[in-house]
Structures are given as C-alpha cells and as structure tokens.
Amino acid sequence: MNSLQTRLLNGRTARPIDLTEMGFGGAPLGNLYRKVSEEDAQAALQAAYDNGIRYFDTAPQYGLGRSEERFAAAIKRFGRDTIHLSTKIGRLLVDCEPDEVTPEAFVDVPQKRIVFDYSYDGVMRSYEASRQRLQVANADILFVHDVCAFSQGSQEASDARVRELFDLGGYRALTELKEAGEVAAIGAGVNEWQVCQKLLGLADFDCFLLAGRYTLLEQDLAGDLPAAVRGPRRRHHSGRPLQFRHPGNRRRSRRQVQLCRCAAGNPGKGPQDRGDLRGPFRAADRRRAAIRARPPLREDRHPGRSECTGGRGQSRRSEHPGPGRLLVRSQRQRPCPRRRTHAGGTLMLRGINPLLSPDLLHALRAMGHGDDIVIADANFPAQSNGRRVLRLDGITATAALEAVLQVMPLDTFVPDPVLTMQVVGNPSDIPPVVAEFQKIVDDVADNPVKIASLERHAFYERARGAFLVVQTGETRLYGNILLKKGVIGS
C-alpha cells in the first residue's frame, strides 16, 4: 500500500473526493493522553504531507479545539486546495469555569466544556465553529461523531442521540450543508458498525469512519458489516487498523499488544496461538525495517497510518502490504481463534486484573491527583449523575473496587478519600456490601482508611463532579463507593 495512491470516495458526490490510501487523524494533536508541543505537532503534519498524505481528519473533541487550531497553521502552508479535509459535529465547546472543563482523554486543553448537541442548531453551530478554528471556507467531509453505544455509554443513550439527530433537525442541517456545497459528503465517525446500519436504515450517508473495528486481529467486521456500507456507492474508512503491535515471537515478547483507543480504546481480539500470524508480521517487519526511524508520535487513525517524528519532521511511508493483504495471508495459514475476554477486558497483559478493561485503564491513567471515581451498583442513575460512564455488566461492585485499588492509590491529603452512600432513614446502618468494601480497602489499598458516608443526594452531587462513574452489575443495595485518587510517585 502506497500512501500516494488515491481512491475516489464514491461516485455520488457533487465534487469528486480522491482520498489517499493513508489519512492523518488529528486526535494526538489535541494532546491525547500526553502533551505534544506545537513544534512537534507541525512537524508531524508536515512530515505526513511531504510523504504524500492528502487526507486529514480532525474533530472539535480533539483537545477541545486544539487539534483543529493546529491544523489551521498547516493548511495555510499546504494550501487548502491540495488536501481533503474532514471534521465532525455532535460536540459543542462552551466557555466554562476551570472546574467545569471536560477534557476527556486530552491534557492541557482550553477552558471549555463539551455539550453534546445533534440538533439542527447544534450541527450548524459546530460546523461554523470548526471552520473558524480551521480557518477554512469549508470541509470536504462532515461526520456525525460518536452516536454509538460505546461512546454514549449505553445502547439506550445511543438510540436517544440518533433520535435527536433526526427528530431535532441535525440530519436536515447536514443535507442542507451538502446541497449548498458547503461540504461534499456526509457520514458518521463511530466505533461500532451496528449504528452505521441503523443510520443507513433512516437516511442517506456517503461514508463511514469506523475506529479500530477492522484490524489484523479483529476480523469480525468483514463478515458483519452490511454490503450497503461497504458497497461501491459508499466508502468505509478503517480508523486505526494498525492500533496494536503483535508480539510475534519470544524475542519481541516485551512489545505487548497495545489496546489503546483514540477517543477512548477499542479492545481488539488476539489469537490464542500467537504463532498463527508470525509469518505475515515478520515479513512486514522486514519491509518496514529498511525505511523506518522509530517515532515518538504515532497516528493510526485512518485507512493507513502516518508515523511521524515530531522534532525531526521525518515520516515512514507504508510501502509494505496493507492490513488487508496481511489479513489474507494469515487466514490462508489458519483462521485466528477468538480470544476470550472477561468484562470487556483482554487477558493479553500480565499483572493486570482482567476486570480492568482497556477503557477503564485509560480512564484511570488519565485521572489526576484529587480526581474522583465512583463504582456504582446496577440501580445507580449513572447516566443522570455521571459526566463519563463505563459499564462492567455482570461484575460486582466489590470485585471492581478490588481491581481498581490494585492500580490506584487513595488520596492522603484529605480526611475522607473513600465515601459510600448512607442508608435512607438509618444513616448509621452499615449494609453488608459496605462492610465488604471496608475489608477490601483494608486488605488491598496501600494506605487503608476508614470509609466515611454521605447522605444519598449529597453522594449524587459528588458523583456528578467525578471524573468517571463505573456502573457494575452489583444488585446488593447501597453498593456504591467513591474513591479519590492519590499521588503516584516516589
């Protein structure tokens, strides 16, 4: 696969969109998980352009506008007419107080908070704000961002966002922008193919950007994605198809499989017998070895990936077979068996409790000193009282608490770093699940403390300000606990 090779998006757009086989995704340039300097960001963009990449994708979510602003400087150098550009709608960025900022997985972000809005007004306002940040007259592709269950926290929340898109005029806004020539194509950027199928049943879309759901180790999509999505009149973009490194052999066993996701990591599936894919991976490694320089900044957001060295502005063009070819070769040898998972987590890392899914690990890592995490029972109104919600269905709150305390210290600078909810009408009562919470804190926490309690509504208020709510399948009453993260370091 050569990054210079182009392919027509489809044959239905008013103006043709020839996309390079590789695209550059802008999430890391929004300081995803770590801060990227302006110099490195611009060097990465320049390296991608110099090596033939002409498709660039970003979104308001990425660094709360920082990625789009960084794209603006690069587009001025490139010339707007030399590239194809996509951005997304669904999140409005609103000025706020410092304690209201919603950075999600991004660091060093502007003082903004995210407001989900898929209405007519929300689409128009989001697109106009993106144009201002990007300093362009228009984009080529406009994606509906993250209406999937993975991003919204539940299937019910996803369905509500889809209804909002159509009932409140969001889709009408998209079609008006397309008919007016403001954008050439409309689509959806999501994490699950099922919502693409639902959107196609409701209206007409040109393309879909699926993040991390069709990779060398996750192959289900090839059979599940409806032909209508993959057909010649619509285009399926594979986001992060190389989002992992395969251990391959004992010599490289320390290169553990990466399960990181970009707006938050899709767990991949890996073979039980790692030898199944050794041949294709070794061949690809040999081809890469001749041209690569190890980069500190990797972007693997689109059909291929650009791997750029920020300060030196170097890039690796992928001249080896693309993921599809490697996939075919591996399947000819022997199909990869499914890897069993537990509660959404993979069993591909040693020393990590399997209850800690990749998404939960990413959230725990993104939390800072003093941030709160709530582990809630099945009755807890998580969607109403949580800025971010992750689910551990089928797992008890006590098991989740033990797993979290194995990797996260408790705060020692406050008197009550662990809180539970008081029993209504009998605040001094200690339910059995809370007694079990105390035993786990005593046995697992590196600095055990006595658990304090809050009145029910006061607990809800603290939960609303928490960094994350983890909703478990706990059925025992009052199985809710709040932890304040401590300092990690010597």
Image (spheres, helix red, strand yellow):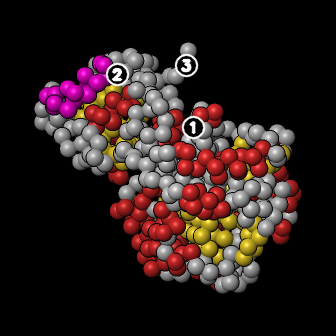
In the image, is 384 to the left or to the right of 434?
A: right
* Residue 439 inside the magenta-drawn segment: yes
Residue in the image at 37% along x and 24% along y: 417
Distance, label 2 to label 3, CA atoms, is 18 Å
Residue in the image at 37% along x and 21% along y: 445
In the image, is 48 to the left or to the right of 68?
A: right
From the image, state whether disc 2 or disc 1 is nearer to you. 1
- Please state the horizontal and vertical placement of residue 481, each as a whole percent of the image: 30, 34
* Residue 469 inside the magenta-drawn segment: no
Front position in the image: 55 or 289: 289
Residue in the image at 33% along x and 26% along y: 418
What segment is highlighted magenta in the picture?
Answer: 429-444
**Residue 34 higher or lower than 208, as above or below:** above
- Counting other residues with Cα less than 10 Å from the Cα at mark 3, is it few (<14), some (14-19), or many (20 or more)? few
Q: Earlier in the sequence, mark 2 or mark 3?
A: 2
Q: What residue is pinned by disc 2?
A: 444
Amino acid identity at mark 1? Gln
Q: What residue is pinned by disc 3?
A: 489
Distance, label 1 to label 3, CA atoms, is 24 Å
Amino acid identity at mark 3? Gly
